[in-house]
Structure formats: C-alpha cells, structure tokens
Image: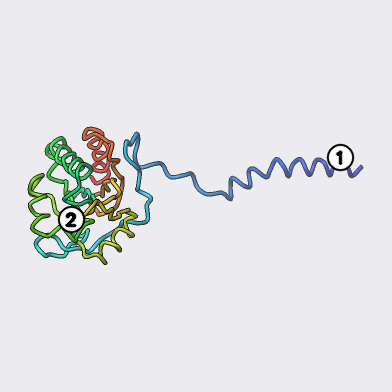
Amino acid sequence: MNVPFSRRQLLLAMLATPLVLTACGDKAPKQPAFRNLEGVDMSSADFAKDFSLLDTEGQRRTMADYRGKIVLIFFGFTQCPDVCPTALMRAVEIKEQLGADGDKLQVLFISIDPERDTPELLRVYMQAFDPNFVALRPTEEELAKTASDFKVFYQKVPTGSSYTMDHSALTYVYDTQGKLQIALRHTQTAEEAVADIRQVLALSK
C-alpha cells in the first residue's frame, strides 16, 4: 500500500522542482541597451576605461577631459595608406551628418607609431581632417600599456628599408560620461555609424 503513495510523492516532487528552480534562479535578463546595431555592443565591456597620454601641445589628457562629449577613439598612424585616412574621413562625415549634435562629438586619434609620428606631424595630420580632432602621442611604454588596456593589436612590419604598421581598425564610441558603449566596424558607412551613435546620444540625454 505504500508504493502508490511513494510514487505520488515522487511525482509531486518532480512537478515542484521547476518551480523551485525558477524561484531560486537569477532575475530576468537585462534588456539590451541598443537595437539593430551595425557596430558592436560594448556596453558590458570591462576594459578600455581610460588613458593618460600627451596631446600634440604637450598637455596630458584623460577621458575626464572630454566629459560631456561623445568620444570616438581610433588607434592609427600618419603613414597609414588607407585604413586610417578612411576612418578619419568617415569621422568627418559622421560629424557633418549629426548636424547640431556634431558639436557633441570629439574624435581622438592615438598614434601607434610614436617613432615617426612627431607632435608637429600629428598636428598637421589632424588639421587636414578637422582642426578639432585631437591626436595623442604615447611613449613606447605608454603605447604598450594603453593598447593592452584597450585590447588593441599593433605590430611593426618591415618593408624594405622602412616599415609599416598592422593594427586593429575598430573605433570605440563613449557616452558623455566616459563609458564605452559601442565599437564601430571599419566596414560601416558613415550613415550606419551615425545611426549607432544616435543611440548612444539617446542614452546620454
């Protein structure tokens, strides 16, 4: 007579288990901050938080200097034949397409070739795109640390009597509080990038 009762107990226990697991589980997952991004959602990233580098005027800069701005950070070098000028020209187009919100944009270009990228050369290079774009020139030691902090790849590649640089091509986008939110892919058009950046602007309002 005890067998049916035992089976009933077992059945009730099995039915109750999912309820217990649900009650003890985590809360509902957080809804994503962005929708239909062309870029990469970096809002949960725990890196690329800050830097401390000299600009072309010899002033040390950190992310705090650009609080209140949507910051775009790109790593490159002035002798880059295509990737870097393409990214910077896209940044110019992004700023134009943002209209009145273009004033909220700050582009930072971090040199991965401090050996050849002198402050004077970097200053002229930025002015060729937009006088308000800022170039930062690390020492070799600062570059190694910053690239590691930002998970950026760079490598010197010999080319005959000279060299070029291989490097990552993502552009990091920060909100007005200095928090990394998205990364623009190099293949994104200016229009696609603007759509992504407007979502970051919406978060900052």
* Secondary structure found at label 1: helix
Q: Residue 140: percent from the left, percent from the top? A: 24, 64
Marker disc for residue 66: 2
Q: Amino acid at mark 2?
A: Tyr
Quadrant where the N terminus is found in the figure: top right
Q: Residue 51: percent from the left, percent from the top? A: 25, 61
Q: Residue at x 19, y 61 (%)?
A: 115
Front position in the image: 38 or 161: 161
Q: Quadrant of residue 120?
A: bottom left
Q: Residue 131: percent from the left, percent from the top? A: 7, 49
Q: Is residue 58 left or right of residue 70?
A: left
Residue count near mark 1 (Cα–Cα under 10 Å), binned few <14, some 14–19, many ≥20: few
Q: Residue at x 27, y 60 (%)?
A: 50
Say which label, 1 or 2, has the lower sequence index.
1
- Farthest bottom residue? 141
Marker disc for residue 4: 1
Q: Residue 111: percent from the left, percent from the top? A: 20, 56
